[in-house]
Every structure is written in structure tokens, then in C-alpha cells.
Image (tube, coloured by chain):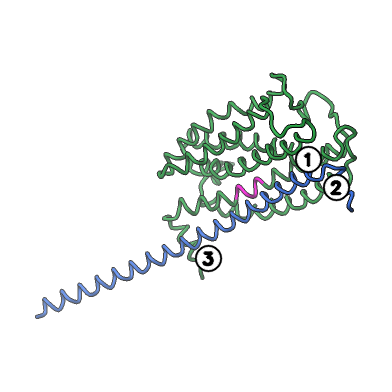
Chain colours: A green, B blue
């Protein structure tokens, strides 16, 4: 039996697959967000130190995780595109960047709103916060670099180099709370310690994280579909598809 | 109910966080939908133009052949 591993690496077969997957990811996102928000606001207890303000963590932590994960996935796709010259990988990298930038902004924004009542400052130049801000600039740099180059293949290559070099920043963000003496607290959930929060808090946070994942997948699939249509607009199948849509 | 929105005095911070996050996560799919519609509209327009062009060219070819035929006959 031979499996064609590259079947869905071509835009022609990936475009309809993405269209079929999209409603499932969108639906799962809505359900999980509803459950996560319910648990986060009505079931999880008030924190004995932070009062109700800790509930900001239910968006802050998942958004911060996503900002790092998306960057790594984006860099991986960009690297694949660079090595194998696969158009779809480069398009996936391009499609992930705006969502990654959005989550990075959300992490910084909610962090500031948590920091003001808890630390007494909207912002401090601490290693965690600074490296996360650099991550935002990496996303924006990736997007503007690609937007500035007209030839899509050259744009993909230049973006890939930037994404891969910038990937060094992700472990720096992750381990910053260990390597430096920062104001930011340590990891909320780590692999070598038992969780230090109530089970309902942990469950709410994990459900919100999965919801952010499925949201990202849904949005990235839709964006890559737009990207495919634009770049393949001269191919027969796109012309046929548009024709079909019109009638 | 009022207690819920007050969030123990942290209402501004909690709702400021959740509000902006919700707004962005609604805005992004909306912008994407608009982009998709724009792409499809642009593609169908350029297809119409291409069709018109080829139609015109065909007519021109027909005219030319007719002309040539006419000239050779006379």
C-alpha cells in the first residue's frame, strides 16, 4: 500500500479540504469558548490573593501560549517552504502570521490590565515582557516584509529567513522567567511540577487554550484559502471555481 | 448581577481584557470574510474581462478573414 503523502500539499486538493474542515473547527471553537467562559466566570473560585482579577488569566495565558506556538508553527511551515519549495507551506506561514500577531497583542494587553492592579504598573521592562514585545515586532516584521515584495516566491523566501532567525526568541520568552530574575511569575503549568492552582481553574484555562487553538486553525484555513485563490488565480481550477460560484 | 460586573473592584481590568479579546476575535473572522468576498469578486471581474477580450479578438479575426475573403474575391 502506498500513501501519497503529498496529496494535500498541492493547493488544488487542499483548498476544498480546508473548506470542509473549516465549519468543524469554527463550531468546536464556539462550544469550547462557551464552556470555558462559563467555567471561568461561574465555577472557578475567587483567588485568595488576587481576588477576581486573576480571571484575566483565562485569556492571558492561552493567548500567550498561542503567540509562541503559532510562531513556531509558522517558522516550521516557512522552513518547509524554503527547503522543499512547496508553495502551500509558505502560504500557511503567511496565513498564520496575522493571528499570531493578534494573540501576541492580546497577551500584552491583558498582561498590562492585570499588571496595573497587581504590580502597580502597566508595563515594566522585564525579560518576559520585553521578549514578548519583540515577538510582536517579529510578527509585524514578517508581515510587512512579505507585503513589501511583489514576487510571491521571493517574498516567501525572505519571510522564511526572518521567521527562522526570529524563532530563537521563542525559547527566550519561555525560559525568561527561569533565566532571569523577573517580576513576571513562573510558568502557570509546567511539566515537572504538580499544578499549583485549583482544578476548576486549570480546567477552564486548558479549555480556553484548546478553543484558541481551534480558532487559530479555523482562521488560518480561511486565510490560506484566500491566499490560494489570489496566487493561483490564473490556473484552470480557480477559473472554473469562480465560474461555478457565479452561476 | 451587579456584583458580577463589579468583579470585586477589578471590573475595569477584567472586562477591559475580555472585551478587547472578544472584539479582536470577532473582528478577525469578519475581516477575513470581507477579504474572501473581495477576492472572489475581483476574480470574477477579471474573468469577465478576459472573456470579453477573447470575444472581441474572435470577432476581429472573423472580420479580418471576411475582409481577406472579400479582397481575394474582388
Q: Are marks 1 and 2 on the same chain?
A: no
What residue sits right under mark 1 in the picture? Answer: A56
Give coordinates of residue A199: x percent, y percent.
88, 36
Q: Give the quadrant of the N terminus of chain A.
A: top right
Whole-Å distance between the Cαs marked 1 and 2?
14 Å
Q: Element type at marker 1?
A: helix
Q: Residue at x 54, y 56 (%)?
A: B35
Q: Residue at x 73, y 50 (%)?
A: A29
What residue sits right under mark 2 in the picture? Answer: B6
What residue sits right under mark 3 in the picture? Answer: A245
Name the subunit of mark 3.
Answer: A
Residue A210 horizontal side relative to residue B55, left or right: right
Residue B72 horizontal side relative to residue A90, left or right: left
Is A219 inside the magenta-drawn segment? yes
* Span of residues in magenta: A216-221
Along the line of sight, which residue is nearer the eye, A7 or A206? Answer: A206
Asked if the residues shown at circle 3 and circle 1 are in contact, with their CB atoms under 8 angstroms apart, the answer is: no
Q: Residue at x 85, y 45 (%)?
A: B7
Q: Residue at x 69, y 38 (%)?
A: A107
Residue B70 horizontal side relative to residue A124, left or right: left
Amino acid at each position: 500500500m502506498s500513501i501519497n503523502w503529498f496529496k494535500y500539499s498541492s493547493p488544488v486538493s487542499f483548498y476544498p479540504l480546508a473548506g470542509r474542515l473549516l465549519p468543524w473547527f469554527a463550531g468546536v471553537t464556539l462550544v469550547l469558548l462557551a464552556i470555558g467562559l462559563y467555567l471561568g466566570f461561574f465555577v472557578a473560585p475567587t483567588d485568595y490573593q488576587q481576588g477576581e482579577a486573576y480571571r484575566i488569566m483565562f485569556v492571558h495565558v492561552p493567548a500567550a501560549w498561542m503567540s509562541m506556538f503559532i510562531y513556531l508553527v509558522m517558522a516550521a511551515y516557512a522552513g518547509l517552504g524554503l527547503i522543499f519549495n512547496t508553495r502551500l507551506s509558505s502560504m500557511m506561514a503567511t496565513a498564520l502570521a496575522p493571528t499570531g500577531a493578534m494573540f501576541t497583542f492580546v497577551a500584552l494587553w491583558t498582561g498590562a490590565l492585570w499588571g496595573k492592579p497587581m504590580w502597580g504598573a502597566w508595563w515594566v521592562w522585564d525579560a518576559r515582557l520585553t521578549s514578548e514585545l519583540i515577538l510582536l515586532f517579529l510578527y509585524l516584521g514578517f508581515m510587512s516584509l512579505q507585503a513589501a515584495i511583489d514576487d510571491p516566491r521571493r517574498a516567501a523566501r525572505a519571510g522564511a529567513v526572518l521567521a527562522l532567525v526570529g524563532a530563537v526568541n521563542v525559547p527566550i520568552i519561555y525560559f525568561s522567567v527561569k533565566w532571569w530574575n523577573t517580576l513576571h511569575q513562573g510558568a502557570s503549568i509546567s511539566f515537572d511540577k504538580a499544578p499549583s492552582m485549583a482544578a476548576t481553574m486549570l480546567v477552564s484555562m486548558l479549555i480556553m487554550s484548546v478553543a484558541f487553538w481551534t480558532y487559530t486553525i479555523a482562521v488560518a484555513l480561511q486565510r490560506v484559502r484566500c491566499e490560494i485563490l489570489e496566487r493561483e488565480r490564473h490556473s484552470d481550477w480557480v477559473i472554473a471555481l469562480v465560474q461555478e460560484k457565479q452561476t | 448581577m451587579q456584583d458580577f460586573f463589579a468583579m470585586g473592584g477589578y471590573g475595569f481590568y477584567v472586562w477591559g481584557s475580555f472585551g478587547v479579546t472578544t472584539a479582536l476575535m470577532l473582528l478577525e473572522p469578519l475581516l477575513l470574510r470581507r477579504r474572501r468576498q473581495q477576492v472572489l469578486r475581483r476574480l470574477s471581474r477579471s474573468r469577465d474581462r478576459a472573456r470579453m477580450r477573447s470575444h472581441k479578438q474572435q470577432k476581429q479575426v472573423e472580420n479580418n478573414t471576411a475582409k481577406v475573403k472579400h479582397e481575394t474575391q474582388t
